[in-house]
Amino acid sequence: MNNSWVRTPLVRVAASAVSWFGFALAFGLLYQVALAVIALGGYCASGGPYEIAVECPENVVAFAPLSIFGGLIAVGIGVFFSNGFGAQLTAWAWAILFIGLAVPFAIGGGVSNWFVCVLFVLMGAAPLVLELRANAARAFIGSRTAGGEAFAFRNGDRRSLMSMTAPAEGTVTPNAGHALAGFLVPAVSAALGVLLAISWFRAS
């Protein structure tokens, strides 16, 4: 079977857009689920044979599992189909997840919530710092052009924990057009995903 279509510019760009849109949508829903649960005192439950002290709202029950699995699918799309084009979702997803979810705990207040908040920030920031130290440009604009040519970064190509690594034979020097495309496609897609998440959660 010929899978050459997977490596086309259209697929790379579309996959980057879809993955960032899907992840932002999933995280936006999960963030609002966390806020709702914190507002209920930090705990709620639904279903089961026992009497429930605090019943979870219907949107929490619906969106909690959907957001988790949706986020994983979105990362998978980025890994397998964007092929290095655009800001690397693998470089940012972990940090966005943990640092983002630290905010509801900070809002909730209290010693235990603040402990979780600080822990989440550290968990999210540590791998991101390592990623940016390895190659910040790659994290923001990707390791390849839409056409598939590998970038040759000035600071070399140190191996990172999360993002895809550009081949050593990369010869294309990233220019303003590459940077704009690699950053704007994910950024706009993510913004649209967040907006949909907010409106969807509020409407449910």
Image (cartoon, rainbow, N blue to C red):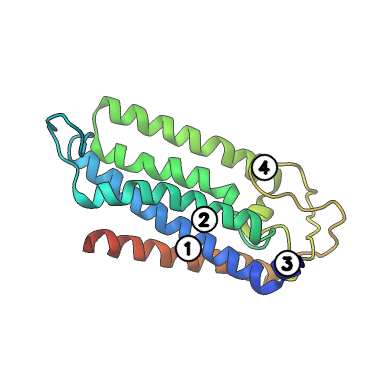
Instruction: Give residue 7's mark.
Output: 3
Instruction: Give residue 21's mark.
Output: 1
* Residue lying at 47% horizontally and 60% vertically, measured from the top left: 22
Element under label 4? helix
User: What residue is pinned by disc 4?
Assistant: 133
Q: Are marks 2 and 3 in contact (CB under 8 Å)?
A: no
* Residue lying at 51% horizontally and 53% vertically, measured from the top left: 73
Q: Are marks 1 and 2 in contact (CB under 8 Å)?
A: yes
Q: Amino acid at mark 3?
A: Arg
Q: Amino acid at mark 4?
A: Arg
Which residue occupies the foreground of this view, 130 or 29?
29
Binning the other alpha carbons within 10 Å of mark 1 as few (below 14), some (14 to 19) or many (20 upward) gives many
| Residue 76 in picture, x, y percent from top left | 57, 52
- Chain-order first, disc 3 or disc 4: 3
| Residue 103 in picture, x, y percent from top left | 34, 42
Horizontal side of 122 relative to 80 (left or right) equals left
User: What residue is pinned by disc 2?
Assistant: 74
- Chain-order first, disc 4 or disc 2: 2
Relative to 204, is 130 above or below?
Answer: above
Q: CA distance from mark 1 to mark 2?
A: 8 Å
Q: Amino acid at mark 2?
A: Ala
In the picture, residue 81 is in which quadrant?
bottom right
Q: CA distance from mark 1 to mark 4?
A: 26 Å
Location of the C terminus (image quadrant): bottom left
